Image: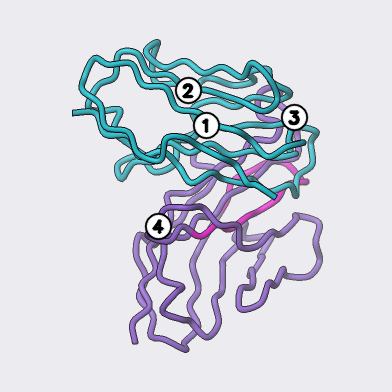
Amino acid sequence: AQKITQTQPGMFVQEKEAVTLDCTYDTSDQSYGLFWYKQPSSGEMIFLIYQGSYDEQNATEGRYSLNFQKARKSANLVISASQLGDSAMYFCAMREGRDRGSTLGRLYFGRGTQLTVWP
Amino acid sequence: DAGVIQSPRHEVTEMGQEVTLRCKPISGHNSLFWYRQTMMRGLELLIYFNNNVPIDDSGMPEDRFSAKMPNASFSTLKIQPSEPRDSAVYFCASSLAGTGLINEKLFFGSGTQLSVL
């Protein structure tokens, strides 16, 4: 089974509008961490935001916020006031807390969502 | 501070040739990861090291691929012989997550764009 599922291959949003990028995850661990990365056309992977499974508040970093719904196992990224520079591929990722011998530290990535912001 | 440094940025080679990709992780990081990114398969974890020891190499496609980490500041990914289907972007990333810290993020290098003709 996929650890991370991003069901939206592509999303479009107008400048200054908000957009939500979906992410669902699959784990039986109680302790885990969720990450979002941005990959612009230049190719580098840029860390955006982190949410721990025990964090009671939704994470926020500037215009980025994470809509964490634990019971639904979803960790959607919300970008407010979109800018043209937000056009990029966005990846959701998860690290599980339990060490299964060969998984400690490993980050599982989704397939990504290509966001296009238009003027 | 320098981030994760990968070289070369671009590599064009002919089928059958040996290719070596290099990575210098962030100083002090104890985990190093090699990823491959393609349109078809997305980001695939090839191998990762914890304290210079390979922990999981189940993602390495086949025997043509090998990776080493002789010390904490250097790793190589070698493909021998290379094939056109190996064309992809190869990322190296490092982290402090090998100690079980869930919130430690991965820091990625700029990637190596490999084209095998």
* For discs 1 and 4, the disc positioned in front in the rendered view: 4
| Mark 2 in CB contact with mark 3 (< 8 angstroms) | no
* For discs 3 and 4, the disc positioned in front in the rendered view: 4
User: Which quadrant holds the C terminus of chain A?
Assistant: bottom left
Pointer 2 chain? B
Q: Is residue A11 above or below residue A92?
A: below
Cα separation between marks 3 and 4 = 34 Å
| Mark 2 in CB contact with mark 1 (< 8 angstroms) | yes
Task: From the image, tell me which residue sits under label 4.
Answer: A42
Rendered location of residue A78, percent (x, y): 56, 74
Q: Inspect the magenta stretch and tell me whether residue A33 lies in it.
A: yes
- N-terminal-most mark, 2 or 1: 1
Q: Quadrant of residue A104?
A: top right
Task: From the image, tell me which residue sits under label 3.
Answer: A99
Cα separation between marks 1 and 3 = 20 Å
Task: From the image, tell me which residue sits under label 1.
Answer: B34
Q: Which residues are drawn in magenta?
A: A25-38
Number of residues whose C-alpha sits closer than 10 Å to that of mark 3, classed few (under 14), some (14–19) or many (20 or more) = few
Task: From the image, tell me which residue sits under label 2.
Answer: B77
**Amino acid at dot 1:** Trp
Which numbered marker is on residue B43?
none
Cα separation between marks 2 and 3 = 26 Å
Rendered location of residue B37, percent (x, y): 39, 40
Pointer 1 chain? B
Cα separation between marks 2 and 1 = 8 Å
Q: Is residue A114 above or below residue B63?
A: below
* Drawing shade for chain A: purple
Q: Do discs 1 and 4 belong to a common subunit?
A: no
**Amino acid at dot 2:** Leu
Name which residue lies at 55% across and 31% down: B23
